[in-house]
């Protein structure tokens, strides 16, 4: 089973995040997902946040250096209130300073 997926440094659109989020919702094996430097927007982050509310396998997520605004960061924070399995989140953004 696939446990680690590195798809960072790609231009992942909001539609790509939506598809990824659908897969993450039913995922039971993937524990580490690297999405750094992928130009993920706040809308894409919203889709990923919805998946994090349901996902119970992912333990590490890299969202470093994407295009996520403070609104996207807030969605992510809301998702983390529901998620008890994610133990490592890599996220850097100037937008986080606006919270």
Image (spheres, grey):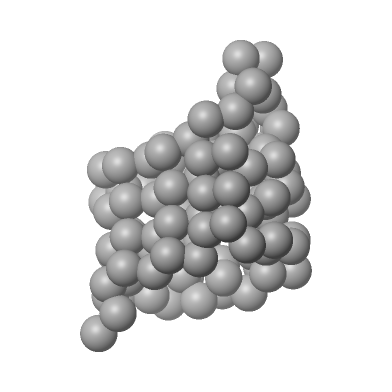
Please identify the quadrant where the N terminus is shown.
Answer: bottom left
Residue 63: x %, y % from top left: 51, 45
Residue at the location (32% across, 51% down)? 60
Please identify the quadrant where the C terminus is shown.
Answer: top right
In this orientation, does residue 99 appear? Answer: no
Q: Is residue 49 above or below residue 4?
A: above
In this orientation, does residue 55 appear? Answer: yes
Residue 10: x %, y % from top left: 63, 62
Residue placed furthest toward the front: 9
> Is 19 on the left or on the right of 82, as rendered?
right
**The quarter of the displayed image where residue 11 is located:** bottom right
**The quarter of the displayed image where residue 31 is located:** bottom left
> Is 87 on the left or on the right of 24, as rendered?
left
Residue at the location (57% across, 70% down)? 20
Residue 55: x %, y % from top left: 39, 62
Most foreground residue, 65 or 78: 65
Q: Is residue 59 above or below residue 22?
A: above
Residue at the location (67% across, 51% down)? 40
Most foreground residue, 26 or 16: 16
């Amino acid at each position: 089973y696939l446990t680690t997926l590195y798809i960072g440094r790609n231009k992942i659109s909001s539609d790509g995040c939506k598809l990824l989020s659908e897969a993450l919702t039913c995922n039971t094996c993937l524990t580490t997902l690297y999405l750094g430097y992928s130009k993920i927007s706040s809308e894409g982050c919203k889709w990923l946040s919805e998946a994090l509310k349901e996902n119970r396998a992912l333990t590490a997520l890299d969202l470093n250096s994407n295009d996520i605004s403070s609104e996207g960061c807030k969605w992510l924070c809301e998702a983390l209130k529901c998620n008890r399995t994610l133990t490592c989140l890599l996220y850097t953004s100037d937008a986080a300073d606006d919270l």
